[in-house]
Image: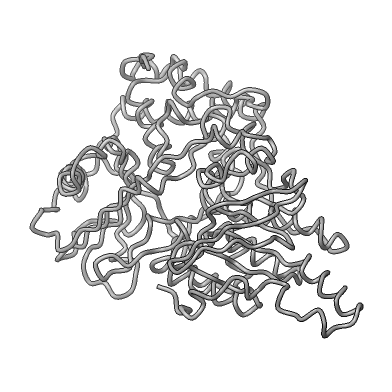
């Protein structure tokens, strides 16, 4: 996928301070070399968090090398070659509140890689291309209750407490079963977390961010590997960052209050090297815990990372033989979809396609984990056909199904905020990055990854470049609970009237 395969397989020891011959330099030169070695930063993990950290560190004038276990950079923001086609990990969107991500893209000179969308569509079964759905008293009432439920969530103060999204929704007596299911699907389709395992505070944070930073959602003009990750890598290398793919971190040791050694494995050999400078660890939280208690005990808070969870968010890409009529060109949410499907017809958005190409996100992909791939695809295609009446199995020319069971997304659960580790650790030369790191509620995904990369770079700056200005990290303003309570009170009479027109109340379900 990358245009820079020449970096693969380089000996990581070639970037160590041992390259110079101490017998051939005087004391001043040796002191300078030792200082340079202490300034070196190794970023382990070439996903968006690690790439961002490397970019920010290089901007500070520090020598940086970036090590990635996979053949290409990008992680979940990248793509893979599958059956001769470039397939994204999923459907990527860039909301206006992704302030750090959008600024990074602008700094890289890649703003043209994104284009704004004009509308977000919600489709119910059998209505696409047919007569418009008539707004009944019940549908209007359900819509008002949905809005009121979101405002009620914003009115909650989760400063010192949290609860599951399930518990919040099931205790709102004004909601109906249909409204609860709709709010849950709205959340699950983008996060993969079922409401029982989802933090209400995190959902509140993302909704508040949308409201405080309104604006058009942007989408990439093509697969993210070619439109973001590959050009990002070229810019990193142009600034002097040494990129090495195919290097997997398998073990670490500590000594005193420092990270002492790294064991790195490649297809050809395994080496252990002494850490002379600083390390930014930008790998998934599960990989961090695999490195053992010697490392996790140095995190702040210590050991909290072991209680974090991730869940898969599946992707189904369908290449059709024709263009489906009436299909919107923007993002679509299938309301009431059993597997929480959202989709985008990239055939209308990306160059080189003359037919419909459906890129679908499958929020409840775990429900299909017990099925063979062909049967899981058949279930999802049949579900799509209830929403897209013109879709026939004969239309499908090619299928790419990625359940991502082995590559899950971080999903904040109730009370997760107190468990998410900070970028600065108890080891003076170890720093952490990843969307699981400490952040304001609602900050995960790409924005969480980019923010954590900047935070890790700032942690390094405070040690190595304290005289330089802090690394810029934009904050996302939130909605004050008191403000939401005023709106909630103003809408209460309307909601009371709407409740008489709506369906049955939600039932608290046993776990």
Q: Is residue 44 left or right of 495 when viewed as pictured?
A: right
Q: Residue at x 49, y 21 (%)?
A: 168
Q: Nearer the viewer, residue 293 or 144?
A: 293
In the rendered image of this protein, does residue 116 appear above or below residue 9?
Answer: above
Horizontal side of residue 215 vs 56, given as left or right: left
Q: Is residue 503 left or right of residue 108?
A: left
- Image quadrant for the C terminus? top left
Q: Position of residue 112 (x, y in %)?
A: 51, 72
In the image, residue 158 sits, relative to residue 289, either above or below, namely above
Can residue 20 be seen by looking at this rendering?
Answer: yes
Residue 439 visible in the picture:
no
Question: Along the line of sight, which residue is nearer the eye, 252 or 364?
Answer: 252
Q: Residue at x 63, y 40 (%)?
A: 296
> x%, y% of residue 343?
32, 51
Q: Is residue 476 above or below residue 44?
A: above
Quadrant of the rendered image containing residue 325: bottom left
- Residue lying at 58% horizontally and 37% vertically, measured from the top left: 305
Nearer to the camera, 421 or 277 = 277
State the image quarter where residue 111 is shown: bottom right
In which quadrant will I find the N terminus? bottom left
Residue 291 is left or right of residue 253, and the answer is left
From the viewer's side, name the closer residue of 422 and 99. 422
Q: Residue furthest bottom?
A: 24
x and y, in percent, of residue 379 in the image: 17, 42
What x and y, as percent, mark residue 32? 86, 75
Q: Residue furthest left?
A: 394
Tell me where residue 30 sits by quadrant. Answer: bottom right
């Amino acid at each position: 996928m990358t245009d820079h395969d020449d970096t693969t397989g380089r000996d990581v020891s070639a970037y160590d301070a041992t390259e110079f011959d101490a017998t051939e330099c005087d004391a001043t030169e040796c002191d300078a070399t030792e200082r340079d070695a202490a300034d070196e930063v190794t970023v382990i993990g070439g996903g968006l968090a690690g790439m961002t950290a490397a970019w920010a560190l290089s901007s500070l004038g520090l020598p940086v090398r970036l090590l990635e276990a996979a053949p290409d950079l990008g992680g979940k923001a990248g793509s893979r070659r599958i059956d001769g086609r470039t397939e994204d990990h999923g459907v990527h969107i860039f909301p206006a509140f992704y302030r750090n991500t959008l600024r990074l893209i602008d700094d890289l000179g890649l703003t043209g890689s994104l284009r704004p969308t004009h509308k977000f569509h919600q489709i119910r079964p059998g209505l696409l291309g047919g007569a418009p759905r008539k707004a009944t008293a019940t549908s209007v009432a359900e819509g008002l209750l949905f809005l009121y439920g979101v405002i009620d969530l914003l009115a909650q103060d989760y400063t010192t407490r949290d609860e599951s999204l399930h518990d919040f929704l099931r205790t709102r007596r004004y909601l109906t079963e249909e409204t609860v299911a709709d709010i849950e699907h709205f959340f699950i389709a983008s996060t993969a977390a079922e409401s029982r395992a989802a933090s209400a505070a995190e959902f509140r944070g993302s909704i508040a961010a949308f409201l405080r930073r309104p604006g058009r959602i942007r989408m990439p003009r093509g697969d993210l590997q070619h439109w973001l990750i590959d050009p990002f890598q070229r810019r990193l290398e142009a600034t002097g960052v040494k990129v090495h793919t195919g290097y997997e971190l398998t073990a670490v040791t500590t000594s005193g209050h420092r990270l002492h050694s790294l064991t790195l494995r490649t297809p050809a050999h395994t080496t252990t090297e002494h850490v002379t400078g600083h390390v930014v660890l930008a790998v998934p939280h599960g990989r961090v815990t695999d490195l053992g208690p010697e490392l996790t005990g140095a995190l702040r808070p210590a050991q909290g990372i072991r209680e974090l969870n991730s869940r898969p968010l599946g992707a189904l890409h369908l290449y059709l033989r024709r263009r489906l009529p009436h299909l919107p060109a923007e993002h679509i949410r299938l309301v009431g979809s059993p597997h929480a499907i959202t989709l985008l017809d990239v055939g209308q958005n990306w160059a080189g396609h003359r037919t419909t190409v459906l890129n679908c996100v499958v929020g409840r992909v775990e429900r299909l984990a017990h099925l063979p791939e062909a049967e899981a695809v058949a279930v999802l295609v049949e579900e799509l056909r209830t929403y897209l009446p013109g879709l026939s199995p004969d239309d499908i020319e090619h299928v790419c199904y990625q359940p991502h069971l082995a590559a899950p997304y971080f999903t904040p659960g109730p009370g997760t905020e107190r468990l998410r580790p900070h970028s600065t650790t108890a080891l003076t030369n170890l720093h952490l990055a990843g969307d699981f790191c400490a952040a304001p509620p609602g900050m995960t995904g790409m924005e969480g990854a980019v923010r954590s990369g900047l935070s890790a770079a700032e942690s390094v700056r405070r040690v190595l470049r304290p005289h330089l200005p802090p690394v810029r990290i934009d904050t996302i303003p939130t909605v004050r609970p008191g403000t939401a309570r005023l709106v909630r009170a103003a809408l209460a009479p309307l909601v009371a009237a709407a409740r008489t027109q709506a369906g049955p109340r939600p039932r608290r379900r046993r776990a």
